[in-house]
Amino acid sequence: MDNSVEAPQASPRSVESTATYGQSARHSWRAIKRNRWAYLFISPFFILFLVFGIFPPLYSLFLSFHQWDIMSPMKSVGFANYARVLSTSLFWKACLNNFIFILMASLPGLPLALFIAFLLDRFISRGRNLYLAGIFSPVVTSVVAVSLVFSVLFDKRGLVNAGLQAVGLEPIMWLLRPWPMKVTLAILLIWRWLGWNVVLYLAGLQSISAELYEAARVDGATTMQSFMRITLPLIRPTLLYTAILSGIGMLQLFAEPFLLTSGQGGAGLGGRGNSLLTMFMYLYNSAFRQFQFGYAAAVSYVMFVLILMLSMVNLKFFGRAADE
Amino acid sequence: MARSVTHYLRLHPGTVMVYVVLGIMTLVIVFPFYWLTISGTHSLSGLMGRFPPPLWFGGEFWVNLQAILNRVPFFRSYANSLFIAITSTITQLFFCSLAGYAFAKYDFPGRKQLFFMLLATMMLPAALSFVPWYIMMGKFGWINSFRALIIPGMAPAFGIFWLRQVIIQTVPDELLHAARIDGAGDFGIYARIVLPVILPGLGALGIMTFMNAWNDYIGPLIILSDVKKFTLPLMVANLSGWGGSTVHLQLLGAALATVPMLVVFFFASRQFISGMMAGALKG
């Protein structure tokens, strides 16, 4: 664990300032004055945060209790928007899709990334950066380009089906049937974020001392055993971090499914049978297609609660390593 | 050294297999980029009317490029994307490194609380601000303006958090003390001592920031409506009906937007990845 996170940091004038810390008002005023540059340095964040960070969510909360199409005056409607969200089956369909994508993309994707990071850390010394550059490249590519390429590769007459036929398998209507559509999106998501997670895991793995592995090897432990007994427990903070981040990302999925299905009629509805409709797409449609801004705000708060709940589950599952 | 264990394993026969398996996997991962590069050089019938689809370059690059330029101001969107990405990157690196330095090396009253607040903001999902953000930009008169895409994100919490880690790990206190004794001011220390030391970390964050701005889709989608102001991703997505009769042009546009960045990334990747890992959470 990185103890520098909690360790008190010496200021350039630490001898004096630690002495004044937490004492009389006059002293802390002096401490504030002495550190005025520090406040100046952090002020851009807090100014921007007040305007663009705090205000929008509060305004969203206010909006969620109103009916508003931007043109006509606002009308207070109490909890009606929330009641409507919770009783709309299309929203729940979108919500279910989001959770299906967690099962289909995060659940296999994160362990795969950990496994690759483990292999890179333990077995690959020469040329490791070449592997990493390749694995990481999808992360730095535009989602538009990525979705476009996938929609052509997975076309019914695309290269993927050509490959399937070459080995004697039946072609699959990847982007025209509900479950194949979900599989295509899951492959895209795993592919796109694999490198990001590998780098995070690798950073965690490299801080595990080699002596631990060496000692385990001397004691006759197999690679599998040292992975289970040494690696896994020691990188739990990173596991938690990636699980939470991935959960938040999956519940706010937008651009990939939006773009993958935008060639099919009724763009933004997630293609046939709303197979790729996500909550964020539903939110986008409510606001920018139907101009129901109050209703859309309520959708965003329902999403917020769901994201919070998922993060809590992750927190519980991966233990108390969350202090970071 | 943490990785010297690989030294003992180098002769292990399994190691060779790991090299091969990961090598094949990496090739599969980069294959879509190869295919993106070649696909835009074919005519529509040469691309979609053929089964199996082509695996090598076609001869239609100039024809397709001309067709794109006849339809939309493609290079204008290139300039727009460059402008937004460069401006965002410079301002973000400046404000994030300033704040990261303050949180790492000053012991000011309220530091812990303010830093906790900063971390908490990273947990706020973007969905929550989605609707009001658009309304606010309307009130500010920033709809259809690059300001909406640059100013709100000038000091992101993640960048501050990350550079704080980098500064804690790479800038020794003695250096700062010595500079102060020599009479350097607060900003002078930041500019002349801290910045040079954290240059690799800044480089890594800079690449990430640049790529994020370059690739952003949702922001421009909501804010920009004038085709002259379109960024590259928006332009490619709007080149006309998706998957329809212009898919070869879209693929060429996407390749022109993506491949130069991938080449730059590839050459900077060693520094970038080690810089990324320096700021990452340690297990």
Image (cartoon, rainbow, N blue to C red):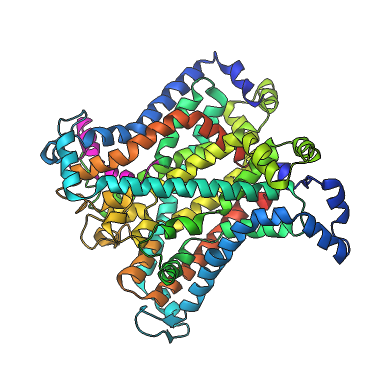
Q: Quadrant of residue B167?
A: top right
From the viewer's perspective, is B227 left or right of A31? Answer: left
Instruction: Tell me the residue at 54%/23% (across/down).
Output: A123
Task: From the top left corner, tell me how far across and down residue B204 is, in percent.
Answer: 53, 38
Q: Is residue B140 magenta?
A: no
Visible residue check, residue A63: yes
Task: From the top left corner, tell me how far across and down residue A6 is, in percent.
Answer: 74, 48
Q: Residue furthest front?
A: B183
Q: How many marks?
A: 0
- Dominant secondary structure of the residues highlighted in magenta in the image: helix
Instruction: Tell me the residue at 54%/73% (across/down).
Output: A58
Image quarter of the C terminus of chain B: top right
Task: From the top left corner, tell me how far across and down residue B102 is, in percent.
Answer: 69, 50
Q: Quadrant of residue B112?
A: bottom right
Where does the magenta region start and end? Answer: A141-169
Image quarter of the N terminus of chain B: top right
Vertical placement of A133 versus A109: above or below?
above
Q: Is residue A157 magenta?
A: yes
Visible residue check, residue A183: no
Q: Nearer the viewer, residue B173 or B131?
A: B173
Instruction: Tell me the residue at 20%/53% (across/down).
Output: B240
Task: From the top left corner, tell me how far across and down residue A132 is, in percent.
Answer: 47, 31
Q: Nearer the viewer, residue B184 or B109?
A: B184
Q: Nearer the viewer, residue B188 or B190?
A: B188
Vertical placement of B246 versus B169: above or below?
below
